[in-house]
Image (cartoon, rainbow, N blue to C red):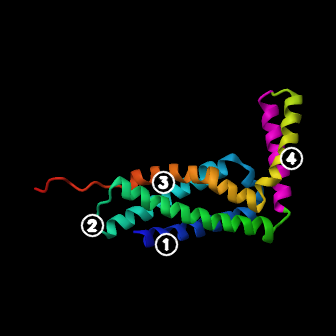
Amino acid sequence: MNANAIKSGVILAVIGIVISLLIYLIDFTIFANWWYQLLLMNAISIGITAYFGVTYRNENDGFLSFGKSYVYSIICLLVAGVVGTIFSILLFTVIDPELSVTLTDVIIEKTESMMAGFGAPQDAIDEQMEKLRTDMPENFSVGGMIKSFFTGGLIMNAIIALIAALFIKKKEPEFEG
């Protein structure tokens, strides 16, 4: 199971990298949208992990407990997460080191616009924008990306693995005939 889950994780990572590269080439500002990570990438992760898990289940005896489905999913997602983090580090430090600065500016603009749209007082907006200008560059550093993987990334992968495992599991019938 582990070898199959690792292979599936690498494939999931490659798909995520291809999508990220396409977005980078078409319009990198999409990275600054909340729905990009939350909806697009997580929905793709759930779908592909479930697909590979069901394929794995069917290639064996056709049954897989929820626990084994979860383990399969978490291994797949952790491999994809590690490979994806390595890609992100390369993107922001080697391929386009200026991307983090540009993306920070876009995130600040979007956040400021959103806060103004919600009617936040200008002094609160100014305070939040200054905090973003100070804190945001750390998110794009090597340490920041690794930290992000080990904090929010692991939690999100655990949740995604639970959802995927629900699609993968298939309980073996207790009684035959």
Question: For numbered disc 1, what is the local secondary structure?
Answer: helix
Sequence order check, earlier mark of 2 and 1: 1
Residue flagged by tag 3: what amino acid is it? Ala
Residue flagged by tag 1: what amino acid is it? Lys
From the viewer's perspective, is the residue at label 4 or at label 2 nearer?
4
From the viewer's perspective, is the residue at label 4 or at label 1 nearer?
4
Disc 4, disc 3: CB below 8 Å? no
Local crowd size for mark 3, using a 10 Å CA cut-off: few (<14), some (14–19), many (≥20): many
Please name the residue shown 82% across and 38% down the image. 113
Judge from the rendering whether residue 36 lies leftward or rightward of residue 1; answer left or right: right
Residue 131 x %, y %: 84, 41
Quarter containing the N terminus: bottom left
Sequence order check, earlier mark of 2 and 3: 2
Does 80 sit above or below residue 130? below
Judge from the rendering whether residue 18 lies leftward or rightward of residue 120; answer left or right: left
Does 125 sit above or below residue 102? above
Whether 102 is among the magenta residues is yes
**Mark 2 and mark 1: Cα distance apart in space:** 20 Å
Sequence order check, earlier mark of 4 and 2: 2
Question: For numbered disc 2, what is the local secondary structure?
Answer: loop
Sequence order check, earlier mark of 4 and 1: 1
Residue holding disc 4: 134
Residue holding disc 2: 61
Q: Quadrant of residue 23?
A: bottom right
**Mark 4 and mark 2: Cα distance apart in space:** 54 Å
Residue holding disc 1: 7
Residue flagged by tag 4: what amino acid is it? Thr
Local crowd size for mark 1, using a 10 Å CA cut-off: few (<14), some (14–19), many (≥20): some
Judge from the rendering whether residue 159 lies leftward or rightward of residue 122; answer left or right: left
| Type of secondary structure dominating the magenta stretch | helix
* Number of numbered markers: 4
